[in-house]
Image: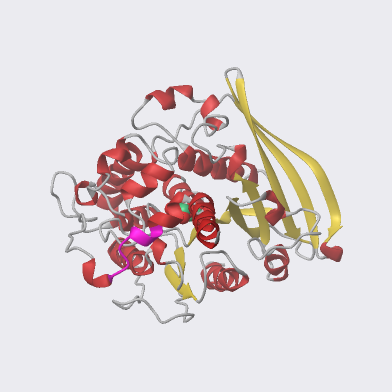
């Protein structure tokens, strides 16, 4: 009887434990087992020319790297559509007890017979009379995290904190662009661009979410409450992979925050620490291009690594984070991505003072252009994280007034 019970408990555990969680245990978490690796040289062109100034970077190398990421990792970023419209569907002049104005906006994008609707929630500080900077979250968790009524408040999107710091704060949900599901992801932006699905370097879900951030940017350029030159795109985890890709593809974003983004986000692939390319392609086959599958177990043959993604955002600031209990997202590999992107910022005369090793826990590096912290705790986006994003953004925007 007892044996039977133990067995049943075991079966129940095996069934309810998600596959990815089991795989976490098989991943390498031992620094001593990180293989020797050589990162692709971000400052050497495909024809082996050394890039020594920002002119050559912008003219020759940047585009080359962007194309490598499009073709091998995130897919094409289709730019053409027939029409875009913005409808403010709900407005409140005195939200948050009078501290903010709420706008709910539906952004509709039309192409051929298809259209996609992005539902934007936006709070603007009530006290400010001129256009304000804004944090835009790519929300990959439940919609209740960005509750416009504020009946539910979540650290994932602490709207009050942003408002009280003089920022507007906005969010849209990834499922408006591509439901996060390997069969359903086609039901969004990809209806406008069905040809992408036939291409081995076609757009997939992460690309679709980044595309959505750019359509919100289109809207911000029309909203007089927003300073469209000061838009910070923020994402957590899979959303943090998308925020990096959005900022790489769309130079209108002034700053990028990538929280616990890990593999194919801010962390170096070649370290093979925590999540690896095979795992991410297997569990989430709808996130990246078909071409990316060629790099399963072959991180070393990728023509890029993630420091080059950060480099594409230069000279605009990037802030990345990790959490102590989230080794799956390779904290050290994330920091090293930033570190290895420094030389591109240097072409713009921007010196970041990153030491060779990551900073201690909860000792954030808050000086633009490259910022970082590792927080105590689990894989999550918390008030602690947002507090640092705001300080980092304050430093940057006040220096540019
Ligand atoms: C999984 C996945 C990660 C991803 C994370 C998340 O753990 O393996 O790559 O970042 O989910 O989005 O929370």
Residue 202 visible in rendering: yes
131 w.r.t. 342: above or below: above
- Residue 204 or residue 47, whichever sits in front: 204
Looking at the rendering, the stretch of residues picked out in magenta corresponds to 24-30
Q: Quadrant of the N terminus?
A: bottom right
Residue furthest toward the front? 1
**Corner quadrant of residue 33:** bottom left
Q: Nearer the viewer, residue 208 or 166?
A: 208
**Residue ranking furthest to the left:** 48
Q: Quadrant of the C terminus?
A: bottom right
Colouring scheme, one of rainbow, by chain, secondary structure, one colour = secondary structure
Q: Quadrant of residue 173?
A: top right
Would residue 240 be seen by someone viewing this image from the given angle?
no
Identity of the residue drawn at 31% across and 39% down: 293
Task: Return the residue nearer the eye: 300 or 369.
Answer: 300
Number of residue marks: 0
The percent coordinates of residue 3 (x first, y second) are 50, 60
> Left of 400 or right of it: where is 46?
left
- Image position, residue 325 (x, y; %): 46, 71
- How far across and down, in percent of the image, does residue 69 sit? 33, 43
Magenta stretch containing residue 234, yes or no?
Answer: no
Q: Is residue 329 left or right of residue 305?
A: right
Instruction: Indicate the position of residue 352 as horizontal and vertical percent values.
Output: 36, 72
């Amino acid at each position: 009887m007892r044996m039977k019970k133990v067995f049943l408990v075991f079966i129940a555990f095996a069934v309810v434990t998600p596959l990815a969680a089991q795989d976490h245990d098989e991943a390498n978490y031992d620094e001593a087992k990180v293989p020797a690796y050589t990162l692709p040289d971000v400052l050497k062109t495909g024809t082996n020319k050394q890039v020594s100034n920002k002119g050559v970077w912008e003219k020759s190398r940047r585009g080359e790297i962007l194309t490598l990421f499009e073709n091998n990792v995130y897919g094409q970023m289709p730019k053409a559509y027939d029409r875009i419209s913005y409808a403010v569907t709900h407005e409140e002049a005195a939200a948050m007890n009078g501290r903010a104005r709420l706008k709910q906006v539906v952004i509709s994008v039309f192409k051929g017979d298809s259209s996609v609707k992005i539902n934007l929630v936006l709070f603007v500080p009530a006290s400010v009379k001129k256009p304000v900077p804004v944090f835009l979250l790519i929300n990959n968790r439940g919609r209740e995290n960005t509750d416009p009524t504020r009946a539910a408040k979540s650290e994932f999107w602490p709207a009050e904190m942003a408002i009280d710091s003089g920022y507007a704060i906005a969010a849209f949900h990834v499922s408006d662009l591509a439901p996060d599901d390997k069969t359903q992801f086609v039901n969004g932006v990809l209806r406008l661009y069905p040809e992408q699905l036939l291409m081995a370097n076609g757009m997939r879900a992460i690309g679709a979410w980044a595309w959505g951030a750019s359509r919100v940017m289109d809207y911000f350029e029309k909203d007089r409450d927003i300073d469209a030159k000061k838009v910070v795109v923020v994402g957590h985890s899979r959303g943090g992979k998308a925020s990096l890709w959005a900022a790489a593809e769309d130079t209108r974003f002034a700053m990028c925050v990538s929280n616990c983004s890990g593999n194919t986000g801010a962390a170096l692939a070649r370290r093979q620490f925590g999540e690896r390319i095979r795992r991410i392609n297997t569990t989430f086959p709808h996130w990246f291009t078909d071409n990316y599958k060629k790099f399963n177990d072959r991180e070393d043959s990728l023509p890029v690594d993630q420091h080059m993604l950060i480099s594409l955002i230069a000279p605009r600031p990037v802030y990345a984070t990790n959490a102590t209990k989230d080794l799956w997202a390779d904290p050290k590999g994330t920091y090293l991505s930033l570190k290895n992107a420094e030389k591109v910022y240097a072409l713009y005369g921007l010196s970041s003072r990153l030491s060779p090793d990551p900073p201690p826990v909860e000792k954030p590096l808050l000086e633009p252009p490259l910022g970082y912290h590792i927080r105590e705790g689990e894989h999550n986006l918390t008030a602690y994280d947002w507090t640092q994003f705001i300080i980092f953004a304050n430093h940057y925007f006040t220096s540019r007034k």
